[in-house]
């Protein structure tokens, strides 16, 4: 679930008429969504909160250059914000690589990695983050992923596809039986 939280802001890639890096990247909206979760699960929700806001802050705000930015304060402010520069984009690649390693280590330590290898009714929900991770591969060429991040990107795609494939296999086996 940490995995899903870290890329869920890109759900705008699959929702018609919503601009990429718009409202779904707003810290205000993301924090509003997290309020009930924090109230219910308290400190256990902190890793998910961090994963949720890391994408717009680290992934897009710091690395956006030129006219590209994010609607960081939507709906209070409709402006597009960017702190990015070419230098920050270069540094960010290494930060993202380090965060990817930390995420995988956390998933192993908390045994959350098991979610990706066991059948469960909710596994089809992984189609949402899978499509947000996979869609840029089909919409832009060359792939908008820095070379150093291609392997982590592919690992993310495999991890998100695995539970879906396991569920589909189980579904097919049950129908054939």
Image: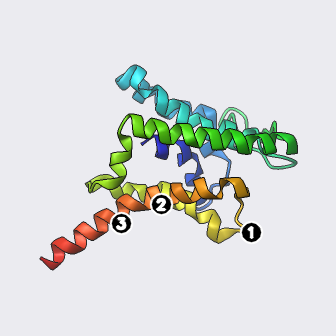
Is residue 64 toward the left or the right of residue 166 in the image?
Answer: right
| Residue 165 image label | 3
User: Residues under labels 3 and 2: Cα distance?
Assistant: 10 Å
Q: Secondary structure at mark 2?
A: helix
As rendered, which of 158 and 50 lies closer to the eye? 158
The answer to whether 138 is drawn above or below residue 58 in the figure is below
Q: Quadrant of residue 137?
A: bottom right
Quarter of the image with the N terminus is: top left
Q: Secondary structure at mark 1?
A: loop
Residue drawn at point x = 49 percent, y = 42 percent: 104
Which one is closest to the eye, mark 2 or mark 1?
Answer: 2
Dot 2 or dot 1, earlier in sequence: 1
Dot 1 or dot 3, earlier in sequence: 1
Question: Badge 3: how crowded within 10 Å, few (<14), some, or many (20+)?
Answer: some
Q: Secondary structure at mark 3?
A: helix
Q: Where's residue 164, x and y in %?
A: 36, 62
Q: Where's residue 156, x and y in %?
A: 52, 54
User: Residues under labels 1 and 3: Cα distance?
Assistant: 27 Å
Q: Report if the CB atoms under discs 1 and 3 are less than 8 Å apart.
A: no
Residue hosting label 2: 158
Q: Quadrant of residue 84?
A: top right
Residue hosting label 1: 142
Residue drawn at point x = 86 percent, y = 41 percent: 87
């Amino acid at each position: 679930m940490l995995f899903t939280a870290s890329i869920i802001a890109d759900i705008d890639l699959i929702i018609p008429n919503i601009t990429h890096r718009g409202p779904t990247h707003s810290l205000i909206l993301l924090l509003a969504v997290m309020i009930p979760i924090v109230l219910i699960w308290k400190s256990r929700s902190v890793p998910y909160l961090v994963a949720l806001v890391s994408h717009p802050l680290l992934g897009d705000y710091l690395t956006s250059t030129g006219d590209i930015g994010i609607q960081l304060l939507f709906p209070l402010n409709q402006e597009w914000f960017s702190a990015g520069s070419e230098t920050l984009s270069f540094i960010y690649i290494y930060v993202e690589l380090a965060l990817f390693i930390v995420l995988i280590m956390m998933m192993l330590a908390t045994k959350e990695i098991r979610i990706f290898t066991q059948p469960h009714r909710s596994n089809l929900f992984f189609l949402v983050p899978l499509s947000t991770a996979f869609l840029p591969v089909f919409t832009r060429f060359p792939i908008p992923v820095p070379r150093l991040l291609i392997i982590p990107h592919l690992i993310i795609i495999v991890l998100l596809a695995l539970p879906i494939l396991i569920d589909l296999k189980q579904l097919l086996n049950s129908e054939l039986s």
